[in-house]
Image (cartoon, rainbow, N blue to C red):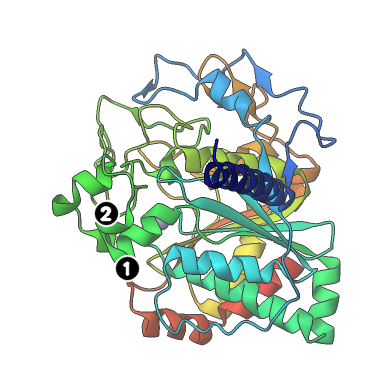
Amino acid sequence: MNVNKKVFFSLCVVIIIILTVFFNNKSTQVKSDYETFELLNNNYDYGNLITDNSEINSEYVTFITDGMDENDFLNIFSKTSKYIKSSGTYKHINYDFEKHLTYSKLERVYLSLNDSDIVNLEIIGNSFDGRNIYSLEIGKGNDVTMFEGNIHAAEIGPALYLTKFAVDLVNNYEIKDPEILDFLNNHKIVIVPSANPDGYDYTIFGRNMIRNKNSYAYLNDNEIDPYYYKANVNGVDLNRNFPSQLGGLFFSDNELSSFTVLDKSTKLYEYFPGNSLGSESETKALMYWIYKYYKDTKSFISLHSAGQVIYDEQQYLSDTFNDEGRKCAEILEKYTGYEIVGVDFDDGFGTDGNSTDFIEELAHGYVYSTKTGRLSTLNYAEQVNEMTQKMCVLTVETLENYTQDLDIIRQEWYDKQLEKALIDIVKR
Ligand SMILES: [Zn+2]
């Protein structure tokens, strides 16, 4: 080996050592940005998660979607989520619906909010196309109010409303506004601004935002009107994909509801619940989130658009529970003038399998049945317990029509005093 070769060889060794150290540090660094969380290891008693009983008479109803796979269901409880460590000191965030932000820009807002000590930011799961689904935990109180937005792709207003809500609360907390300090020291608000982040990007910015070129929305883009698209980019209506008791649609009198479809769907009034319930990664993320908080939850509000109405009851659930929901709906009605619609239509027929059905039934003591792959209970009619006495569950349709117009979205926020309404729901 001559001198030049020796020098070259030594240089290579040094470079390899430097690179090894650098990348090792880098991977340690990424790990230390997170604190992981699993339901089963955190003082939750999930001993009675499953039953082999079911009160569903299969001669009376026919499910056209399979229930949730048992292993998929159990995996929710050993699923690892991540709390993100804050990266700096909080800086005031300006956000007033100025322009359409891509989901990755919204993510930056959530990461910036996480710099406040009143916020805990958690990644509760990922979407079909690999986007992070975030939960913002804001406040130090024991009672919890859960807000879910944008489970339907084109319903982007709610994602923006919940982002605006979080930004305003944290900005005011950071300037030590006495009312907000008191409010956030006594309540805990948990927000999933966008439950369908792929749908969010797709509906606003088009199919090139989707990385998975085999996804349903990408492949069928020419037949889809993104302006009205409801499903995730895998073609499944997430808000019909929850394993609630009557989830998965059914025939009654051998007639299929006009809403229900048996395959992946593109249209506004077509609900495809998936080939089996709980099949979608977004649904699993939300189930994890609901199991984590429901026992301490006073209100669960699912924000949609459009129609300016509030759905507040379920025929088959307890009067105690329905009364509580009505009181809570009236708070929203007072500010917004949105019309309260008790559930008039029959259960089933494509309207079940919502996130709201799921948490309502959990509150009533339903557990997963291995027979149906859905929630079930034998004490089905009247359940009065600590949870059903305090919990309000609402589906709120904001805005008059489907829209991406930021002026209209902003105007609704201020005209309908949505922020005050949400704060009063938390305070109730
Ligand atoms: Zn909706």
Q: Residue at image x 42%, y 79%?
A: 409
Confirm or deny contact between disc 1 and disc 2 (CB under 8 A).
Answer: yes
> Could you give the CA–CA distance between mark 1 and mark 2, rounded to whole angstroms?
10 Å
Q: Residue at image x 51%, y 32%?
A: 243
**Quadrant of the image for the N terminus?**
top right
Left or right of 271 on screen, residue 50: right
Q: Where is residue 79 in the image (x, y as percent from the top left)?
A: 64, 33
Q: Position of residue 217 (x, y in %)?
A: 26, 47
Residue 154 to residue 255: above or below: below
Q: Which of the four quarters of the rendered structure image does ligand 1 lie in?
A: bottom left
Q: Mark 2 points at which residue?
A: 268
Instruction: Say which label, 1 or 2, has the lower sequence index.
Output: 2
Report crowding for label 2: few under 14, some 14 to 19, many 20 or more residues within 10 A (C-alpha). Answer: some
Residue 297 to residue 236: above or below: below
Q: Mark 1 points at which residue?
A: 402
Instruction: Please state which of residues 306 and 61 is positioned toward the viewer in this rendering.
Output: 306
Q: Residue at image x 61%, y 14%?
A: 53
Left or right of 72 on screen, residue 252: left
Q: Dot 2: what SS?
A: loop
Where, by quadrant of the figure, is residue 17 drawn?
A: top right
**Quadrant of the image for the C terminus?**
bottom right
Report crowding for label 1: few under 14, some 14 to 19, many 20 or more residues within 10 A (C-alpha). Answer: some
